[in-house]
Amino acid sequence: NPREATIPSPHEDTFGWIWTEKKHNFVDWLEKSLNDVYWITGRPGSGKSTLMKYIVKDERTQKCIATEAGVLAHKLLCYYFYDMSELSTQQERNLDGLLHYILYQLLSSFPNLQKEISKLFTQQVLPRCCSTSGNLISPWSLEHLKDALMKISEQKYVHGRICLFVDGFDECQGDRSQTLGFVLSWLAKMQASELKIKICIASRYIHDIMERLKPSLQRPSLELHEWTRDDIQKYIQDHLNDAVRRSISLSSKSHRIFGDQLVSNIVGNAEGVFIWVKLVVADLESGLEECQEESQLQSRLKALPPGLENLYEHIISEIPVKDLHAVYKYFRLLLRAPGDKCTLTLLQFLVAVQQPEEAITCEVKYHSGADHDEFLFQKLELMRDHLKRRCRNLIKIRNRKYASRRWDPLRRENVTFIHVTLKEFLKKTEVQRRIR
């Protein structure tokens, strides 16, 4: 599940309210099983994945789960769906990936469960594996996975407590209602067994998810954008105040007053959306680096509209005409990446820019050798600078932390959009007409 490595860590001293505030009942839910399901929702780009990663990595989560389990064995599991996955398979985008993960973790953590599914494996799964030509990603079909998990829910001799976190449920492909329906029905059966499980789901507020959760919840457990105002303010202060102090176009007398005005104006328009805030702060930092004066910076901020899609529209409209053709080309390349994942390695992206026909047929060829590799490294570095300078932070380059060791260094970086919401914006019909 390499998605976890691509999720940014939270800004310093943010999200602490998840442990101290009582109104959202998160700690009580962890410790006391008030309900089998906890639903974290929020506006697109509000930081749901970052919060989930923060919770899972925090040692307090383990302590709370241990409190509920008492003397019983306990396990924390976490799975991330991701529409722009770097994997060549659909693992992070469908139910199969989640069920593979759950089954593997259950059998690893509670080995005695293996005998529950041994008959299923030997009679149905193993023959399927032996009868294929060797190109099968997994011998476990979706139905086999469902059957195995249901068999585990019927056992009575393995005792324990499991807390499962599932992020990005709205990015799961296929019929989300059916997918969630199976997960909840399995959850209910597990609750009747000795190996009890509860689930924390993070997703956007989507009707079919809400309808499925209604028997368990009348409303979301936590709406993230309602809780992050102070976190957003701290992020802006830490980034902008330092940039304001270093500015040579502002007098030392106006540093604090102007900095506070910027923070207040941005927080007021953020609507709890962290991606919007990051783009606005980056834009203002560019203005400060360009030595713009106070009046220019105020005008710059005023021109940045609230609402994430409005901001995308504005940022693209501000790209100089001389760069616009190239930027539109970059957008199209990512939108046409294999599997609709909007992700290419930096080397693939470079080849696609220079030699589109080879890139389309996936025939990325280059001659090995120290001199040629050095030449390619120089071109990749130029491509990095080029993207940063032209794309106004809408396209990002990130390391592939789980890249295979057999991969050469030229293939260990990915190019992708800043957020899945940009992909959704660019796929709108009216925007597609413009970037063709």
Image (cartoon, grey):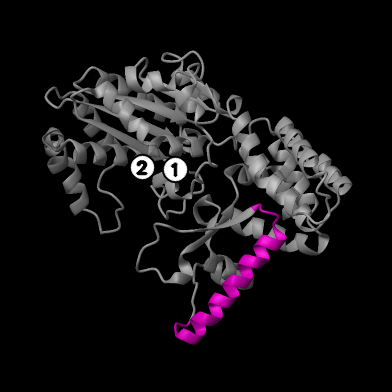
- Please say whether residue 392 is one of the residues in the magenta stretch: yes
- Please say whether residue 413 is one of the residues in the magenta stretch: no
Q: Which quadrant of the figure contains the C terminus?
A: bottom right
- Image: magenta residue range: 367-394
Binning the other alpha carbons within 10 Å of mark 1 as few (below 14), some (14 to 19) or many (20 upward) gives many
Q: The disc labelled 2 sits on which kind of residue? A: Gly
State whether the magenta stretch is mostly helix, strand or loop. Answer: helix
The answer to whether marks 1 and 2 mark residues whose Cβ atoms lie closer than 8 Å is yes
User: Pointer 1: what residue?
Assistant: 93
Q: State the SS at label 1.
A: helix
The correct choice, above or below, for 152 with respect to 282 in the image is: above
The correct choice, above or below, for 13 with respect to 161 in the image is: below
Residue at the image position 36 percent from the left and 42 percent from the top: 97
Q: Is residue 145 left or right of residue 49?
A: left
Q: State the SS at label 2.
A: helix
Residue at the image position 36 percent from the left and 63 percent from the top: 404
Residue 53 x/y as whole percent: 44, 39
Q: Is residue 345 left or right of residue 425?
A: left
**Mark number displayed over residue 97:** 2
Q: The disc labelled 1 sits on which kind of residue? A: Arg
Residue 67 x/y as whole percent: 28, 23
